[in-house]
């Protein structure tokens, strides 16, 4: 059975973002301890590529549109990079984020960063075209790569590999109520609602420090971690305050950004945000994390924050209520229908700022830590954001009790110095609310 098919609308959007702005490709980073042999890792990659139809696909452009095609796809190759210090892995991630995927050849890349400072510390970095993967499936891909590596090097018998079935375009598996004429009307209403919120209320943003055309933009990255003890206290505090970790992090981002952009005359500041949500368990039948595809959506929320000071936890509950309302209304599915239109606007009006910030939190990563003699000590991800000038993106994963936050932003729209200052405030606020320090006051500028 052929796995070739025409790209769905959302997949087409991802290809446009890849080729025109190096945006939204998913970079996943694993810190692996142990002795990794590149030649064995290359064999593991071959097995993984055989198992996943989309990993052995490429995208071709025909007269009537874009298609996935398996014929002519390049065999995956492992790039090995040797660095003097293992901290230099971030430079490799930046390089990967700012390089388009040659989709007519292959839809993913793999890099192994080896350290001359400590030969037993490695960084496994995969870059996946967002048309074929989301953050959850890219994490599972790392599990499969390390699992096959252990089986090969230990001499274990590898059973005949069962090829997974390629997922259809997400538009084809959405609830019927989203795909019929009523769903099209609801999607149009949602688009008009977002447009009204954005252009009537004009949510405040971090602004463009320096405007350049889309081809000149590039993604920058700042990585932070929250120690396991603080992470667990923060999660427990969220439960006590009857809110989610995602909503609490959003509230902290809202407050930190509001402090930076508040003016003397402001009594309240309106902020917009994008929050990403996994759809796998919300579809019928449920889609497993091992099945690669873009099975996620974006929710856009709007909120007001008082400049006189506001409890983080009250704000977090407000954010959660808003997101639950959007979810219950079915707009999480309708967003897929209008996603390409929203992205088209970013290209048509390149000076417009899409949102104040964007957050993608995959929560607790429940995957094995050990793979034979190898140990997975950290795993995190980041989505390239070159197109989205003025938007601070944060990608969050919690593994082995530790929260890892990768902040991504478009340069030169947001300078690294000012963005790092904002990020430090965010991290400080996480520690402060964990220790139940009284609410912060917004300082006017």
Image (cartoon, rainbow, N blue to C red):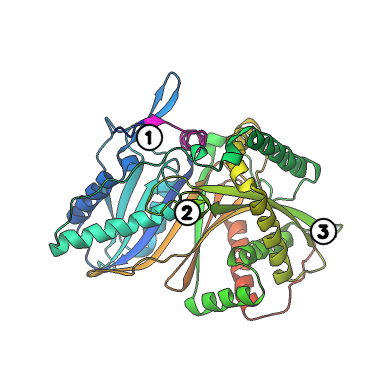
Callout 2 touching callout 1 (CB < 8 Å): no
Q: Earlier in the sequence, mark 1 or mark 3?
A: 1
x, y percent for residue 358? 60, 53
**Tag 3 residue:** 268
Tag 3 secondary structure? strand
**Tag 2 residue:** 382
Callout 3 touching callout 2 (CB < 8 Å): no
Asked if the magenta segment contains residue 6, the reply would be yes
Q: Residues within 10 Å of mark 3 (few under 14, many from 20)?
A: some
Tag 2 secondary structure? strand
- Which is more toward the observer, 103 or 148? 148
x, y percent for residue 40? 18, 55
Secondary structure character of the magenta stretch overall: helix
Residue span colored magenta: 5-21
Q: Earlier in the sequence, mark 2 or mark 1?
A: 1
Tag 1 secondary structure? loop
x, y percent for residue 287? 43, 51
Point 19% across, 51% down: residue: 43
Q: Residues within 10 Å of mark 1 (few under 14, many from 20)?
A: some
* Mark number displayed over residue 103: 1
Q: Is residue 313 left or right of residue 91?
A: right
Residue 3 in view (yes/no): yes
């Amino acid at each position: 059975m052929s796995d070739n098919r025409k790209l769905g609308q959302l997949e087409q959007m991802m290809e446009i973002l890849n080729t025109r702005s190096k945006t939204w490709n998913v970079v996943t980073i694993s810190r692996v301890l142990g002795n990794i042999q590149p030649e064995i890792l290359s064999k593991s990659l071959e097995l993984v590529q055989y198992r996943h139809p989309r990993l052995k696909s490429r995208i071709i452009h025909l007269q009537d549109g874009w298609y996935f095609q398996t014929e002519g796809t390049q065999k995956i190759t492992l790039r090995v990079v040797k660095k003097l210090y293992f901290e230099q892995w971030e430079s490799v991630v930046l390089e990967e984020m700012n390089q388009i995927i040659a989709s007519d050849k292959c839809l993913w890349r793999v890099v192994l960063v080896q350290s001359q400072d400590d030969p037993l510390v490695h960084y496994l970095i995969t870059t996946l075209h967002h048309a074929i993967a989301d953050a959850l499936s890219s994490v599972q891909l790392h599990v499969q790569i390390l699992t096959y590596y252990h089986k090969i090097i230990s001499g274990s018998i590898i059973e005949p590999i069962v090829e997974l079935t390629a997922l259809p375009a997400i538009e084809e598996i959405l609830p019927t109520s989203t795909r019929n004429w009523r769903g099209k009307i609801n999607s149009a209403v949602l688009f008009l609602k977002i447009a009204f919120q954005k252009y009537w209320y004009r949510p405040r943003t971090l602004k463009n420090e320096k405007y350049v055309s889309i081809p000149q933009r590039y993604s920058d990255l700042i990585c932070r971690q929250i120690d396991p003890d603080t992470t667990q206290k923060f999660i427990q505090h969220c439960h006590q305050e009857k809110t989610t970790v995602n909503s609490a992090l959003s509230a902290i981002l809202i407050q930190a950004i509001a402090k930076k952009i508040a003016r003397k005359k402001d009594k309240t500041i309106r902020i917009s945000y994008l929050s990403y949500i996994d759809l796998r368990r919300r579809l019928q039948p449920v889609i497993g994390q091992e099945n690669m595809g873009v099975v996620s959506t974006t929710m856009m929320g709007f909120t007001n924050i008082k400049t006189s000071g506001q409890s983080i936890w009250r704000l977090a509950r407000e954010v959660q209520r808003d997101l639950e309302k959007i979810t219950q209304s079915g707009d999480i599915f309708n967003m897929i229908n209008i996603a390409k239109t929203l992205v088209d606007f970013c290209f048509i009006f390149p000076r417009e700022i899409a949102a104040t910030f964007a957050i993608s939190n995959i929560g607790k990563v429940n995957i094995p830590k050990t793979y034979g003699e190898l140990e997975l000590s950290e795993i995190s991800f980041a989505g390239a954001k070159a197109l989205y000038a003025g938007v601070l993106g944060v990608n969050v994963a919690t593994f082995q009790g530790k929260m890892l936050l990768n902040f991504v932003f478009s340069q030169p729209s947001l300078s690294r110095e000012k963005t790092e200052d904002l990020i430090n405030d965010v991290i400080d606020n996480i520690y402060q609310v964990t220790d139940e320090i009284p609410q912060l006051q917004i300082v006017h500028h």
